[in-house]
Image (cartoon, grey):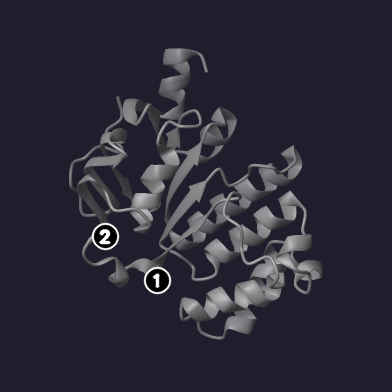
Amino acid sequence: MSTYATDQVAADQVINITGLCKDFDGKRVVDDVAFAVARGQTVALLGANGAGKTTTIAMLLGLLLPTAGRIHLLGEDMVRHRHRVLGRINFSSPYVDLPRRLTVGQNLTFFARLYGVADPKARVRELAARLELEDLLNQQMGQLSAGQKTRASLAKALVNRPEILLLDEPTASLDPDTADWVRGYLQAYQKRRGAAILLASHNMAEVERLADFVLMMRAGHIVDRGTPVELIQRYGL
């Protein structure tokens, strides 16, 4: 089996997770999760709703404190020093709304300034052109279709040119052609930037397209791991 996404420390690992646990009201929803992601690598968390994927990503972002375990991103402990690396990572999920009364352009400009992006207006124009958002910049987020919101959310996630990109079901609600286009864009971005991507998904076709390595989650546990080819051979997915 491939040695990707183990808990062994290596110089090029930009995500390193060991013994990660999270309890809610006495119930353990993430249990002893351990893996690592190298620079330029995409690792997928594959599992059904409730498997613990989103909770794991929320802990990596510092939105939830772990009950136990350690999270290191870009060499920093995210429990104690997340302020040192938050400007170098970003996140996208179609389930997290951007401010609905602001326009797409206002949202992207706000986040560009929040992340300290040089020349925010130029960066917003660049992203709008690349993600085909130019005709939507003056529309309020609340007026957009689900697919348009997903593209705007992705633009927000890329506004600071992150070294680590955390994606929670990034193509949910998109039609097949648009979803395929977004996957291709993510691959091109990763190639240009050398970013590490952690992808949460229950779409095996998407995982097969994007991921170098897969962690299968069930009820908060990692129950298997391997390359997409290895898992397809093992389970006939």
Q: Are marks 2 and 1 in contact (CB under 8 Å)?
A: no
Which residue is rendered at x = 62% and y = 53% of the image? 185
The residue that label 1 is drawn on is 87
Q: Residue 34's x, y, as percent?
A: 25, 38
Q: How crowded is mark 2: few (under 14 residues within 10 Å), some or many (20 or more)?
A: many
Task: Tell me where residue 24 sits by quadrant.
Answer: top left
Which residue is rendered at x = 63% and y = 44% of the image? 171
Q: Residue 143's x, y, as percent?
A: 79, 61
Q: How crowded is mark 1: few (under 14 residues within 10 Å), some or many (20 or more)?
A: some
Left or right: 151 in relation to 229: right
The residue that label 2 is drawn on is 78
Looking at the rendered structure, the secondary structure element under dot 1 is helix
| Nearer to me, 46 or 52 | 52
Which is more N-terminal, label 1 or label 2? 2
Q: Residue 158's x, y, as percent?
A: 54, 64
Give the numbered dot on residue 33: none
The reply to whether residue 180 is in sight is: yes
Q: Residue 209's x, y, as percent?
A: 56, 36
| Nearer to me, 40 or 27 | 27
Q: Is 163 located above or below residue 183 in the figure?
A: below
Which residue is rendered at x = 62% and y = 72% of the image? 108
| Nearer to me, 208 or 79 | 79
Left or right: 55 in relation to 77: right
Which residue is rendered at x = 32% and y = 29% of the image? 222
Q: Is 116 located above or below residue 55 in the figure?
A: below
Q: Which marked residue is nearer to the observer: mark 2 or mark 1?
A: 2
